[in-house]
Amino acid sequence: MKILLYTGLLKLVEKSGIGRAIHHQQKALVESGIPYTTNIKNSYDVVQLNTIFLDSVFVAILAKLRGKKVVYYAHSTMEDFKNSFKGSNLLAPLFKRWIMFCYKLGDVIITPTEYSKKLLEGYGIKKPIFALSNGVDLSYFSPSTEGAQRFREKYSLSEDQKVVISVGHYIERKGISDFIKLAKRMPEVTFLWFGYTNPNIIPGVIREAINTAPKNVIFPGYICRDELRDAYSGSDLFLFLTHEETEGIVLLEALAMRIPILIRDIPIYKENFSDGKELYKGSTLDEFQDKIKKILIGELPSLQNSGYKVVEQKDIRLIGKQLQAIYEGLEKEDESFAVEFPQQCKGKTGV
């Protein structure tokens, strides 16, 4: 069975989690020895789609007309579309209808977590849905002293300077407002936000918050994967204040890098992470500030090893094996589709 990993319009999502997920899928296919192509002109048996642009819809319909199978990755939900770009809350109901139309073109749907799977079930989608992590490349994301030094030198940070980082678009959903508010409360700490969004598509209140951020907040913009690995290595805390996610690839990366982590306590992370066990959680600015201080001075115990054990189960090589099980189920086209997957893959719903 040969897979067409469709990468049309990849440049539009290259700097987002979806773009990173596509690269992860490519790595998983290679590591698992699964034949694949990214050239739509080549022969294939299954097309794998990741975006909800018109070109992906066209490719899905064309594949069906040719008798091919369609795997549709559901990276987006109405819930994580809200509080993002200008007008996103008004457009959210229409966005939901559109993504439902797209995802229903799949013979199977893959979404990163049980949480996002339940959201899709709630939409009334009657197709097999599997919860399968986007994964993380553990062979790449590991801390290094050299990387830490490069990071500190690049941003002129002394060895004893306390540094908190986060990664994401300049949108309210990612928690950038609270990130800046915390920096104002803690002038003795340096805060860096990696990522970039065109100011023309973000709400004015976010632009104002960024423009008036205190001097201890640095916005380096989008950086390459190598530089981000250095940043994880050289920082004292990864602060993830997102209000809604389907998974959060950067959180997986931070876990792999064994950096102390503090996240917002939101539903998606209730099952896999316990406060004070794999990482730390908070809900209010006061709680975040208190835990940041305690983590930075070592008053709270290190949780990096227990956090790493969670992310070990999401290594790209394991994800590749689980993907292969899904492809094999598609090929059989019978009732065994639901029962012959490895234990990690059991997550089908629908008929």
Image (spheres, rainbow, N blue to C red):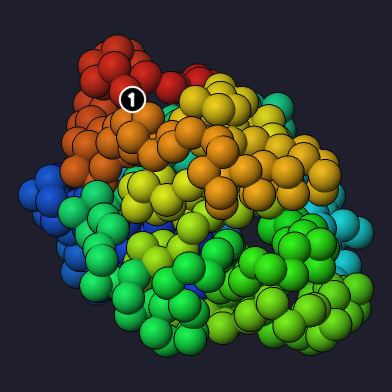
Residue 26 visible here: no
Q: Which residue occupies the foreground of this view, 67 or 97?
A: 97
Secondary structure beneath label 1: helix
Q: Which residue occupies the foreground of this view, 116 or 44?
A: 116
Q: In this view, does 191 lie above or below 308?
A: below
Q: Residue at x 77, y 40 (%)?
A: 287
Q: In this view, does 47 lie above or below 273?
A: below
Residue 234: x, y in percent? 40, 66
Report the residue that reaches farthest toward the left. Answer: 33
Q: Residue at x 14, y 56 (%)?
A: 30
The residue type indicated by label 1 comes to Cys
Residue 251: x, y in percent? 49, 49
Q: Is residue 205 left or right of residue 288?
A: right
Residue labelled with disc 1: 345
Residue 191 visible here: yes
Q: Residue at x 71, y 38 (%)?
A: 282
Q: Residue at x 68, y 76 (%)?
A: 217
CA neighbours of label 1 inside 10 A, class few (<14), some (14 to 19), many (20+): some
Q: In which quarter of the image is the N terminus?
A: top left
Residue 103: x, y in percent? 56, 46
